[in-house]
Amino acid sequence: MSPVFSTTPLWIAARHLLGVHSADFFLRWAKVTKGFGVEEIHDLRVASRRLREGLALFEPCFPDKELSRIGKQVKQVTGILGSLRNTDESILFFSALEPEELLQADLEVRDLLTHLEKEGKAARKKLKGDLHAIKPGPLKSVLSATLDKPQLFGNTQVDPFQDFSLFADVAITVREQPLSKLLPQALDEANINAQHQLRIAVKRMRYRLEILEPLFSSDFPELHRALKGYQEVLGKLHDLDVFAQMLLDRIPEGAGQKSLLLTIAAKRSRLYASFLEMLGSFPVDTIGAQARSYL
Amino acid sequence: MVQTAAELQQLKGIGRILVQRLLEAGLDSFAKIVQAGEEGLKKVRGLNPRNINSILEQAKLLSKASHTGRLARVEALQQRLSEVKENVQSLAETTRQRFPEELTGKCGKKLTSDLVRIEDALEQMNNGGKKGSKRAAKALSKAQKRLAGLEGASLKKVHKGLKKARKAVLSAPK
């Protein structure tokens, strides 16, 4: 297939890019079903998210919310993979705690790890069953049939013949707005909900820009690195919040729980400082404008 | 690129019989003859050893010319492909502007289906490379003829024209 250019008509670019990302998604799905490896599961999860972003992006080019229906099925796959990821991350975090960080909570953490490992095994088993229950074939057929039916005439939402770069400009603005809106709230260190929402907004912006990548100049990798950096830091902050809640829910109150919560709070503080540092060097709310300037 | 028997006979000193023997030895192109060199040609029964150097020189020149010709053909094909793409896009756009009401239903769906199939066929041609470029060029030229003059035509004629253009591009080698 030929690459997409800024002057490519939107409907052609939409079909091409959705074709590329859905092929990637199904390829990774096939790889997961072969061995259920951790890396493969992670890659499929990312591919499913990227495809969902693509489906949302190009939804106006296709009739009657067909892509949104397909998106729901893809979301099911993302969901199936998610529960295993949470358990794996928790095991990784608690087993990597240093002895001086564990202090009086050694026994409790060991107990928690045993439970988490059991849950991990059960989650892996469930994932295999759930993923086998969804057949990629029918989804692939529906997607391919939908891509053959772009809404070229009578489309009131978007001009399917416009230059792809014009559409991309607006599409980036849409994902840029939540970033600017959430940033002031996320600057309050205690506002973990705003930081979590900001993380989701960053993730969506990242996937959208990855889809639009064929339009960008050679400066894009730097911007992409910055976005990935934000996603990582905000992701780790969120993970720590989940672990803290896990301690509150699953470890009995006492000195052990308290010391572990303090350890997590200290880690969070350091991470938050690096988030602020990143804001100083590449403000997250300017990423959209920067990306648009590369078009 | 494989040469026909007639093309190989352009080599002075190579007649009908020797062409057959070259082909039997797997030397079916000027480039392969050059690659086989003196040693390779010596193995071809009935080939006068005194002609070998001259045949190699001629094959070198003809191979170069054939390569340049092929490149020119591929470039011309790419050019024509983008012209047809532009024609199709512009026709689709003007048709949409001229018949906004008529194209909302079944008629619009049919036209969309034709446009999608034309676009896919053009894309396949683009990815097909050099193979069958002569036939592809012919198909594109036919499609261009079918699309010509449709910008101001009635919806029925536009539909017919697109259908014929679709058939033309689908007939091109994949």
Image: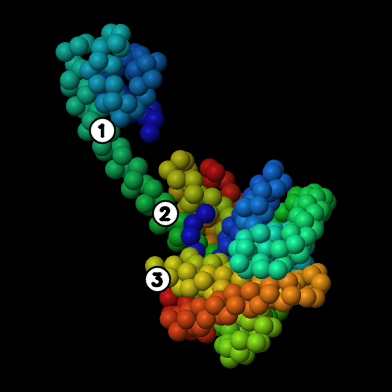
Q: Is residue B99 visible?
A: no
Residue B18 in picture, x, y percent from top left: 32, 14
Disc 2 target residue: B78
B12 horizontally vs A172: left or right: left
Which kind of residue does numbered mark 3 sit on?
Answer: Asp
Counting residues from the start of the chain, the first of labels 2 and 1 encountered is 1
Disc 3 target residue: A219
Quadrant for the N terminus of chain B in the image: top left
Chain letter, disc 3 residue: A
Disc 1 target residue: B62
A163 horizontally vs A256: left or right: left
Which kind of residue does numbered mark 2 sit on?
Answer: Gln
Q: Are marks 3 and 2 on the same chain?
A: no
CA gap, disc 3 to disc 1? Answer: 46 Å
Q: Mark 2 falls on what kind of element? A: helix
Point out which mark residue A156 bears.
none
Which kind of residue does numbered mark 1 sit on?
Answer: Leu
Which residue is at a point 56% across and 70% down the rendered structure image? A232
Between circles 3 and 2, the one closer to the viewer is 3
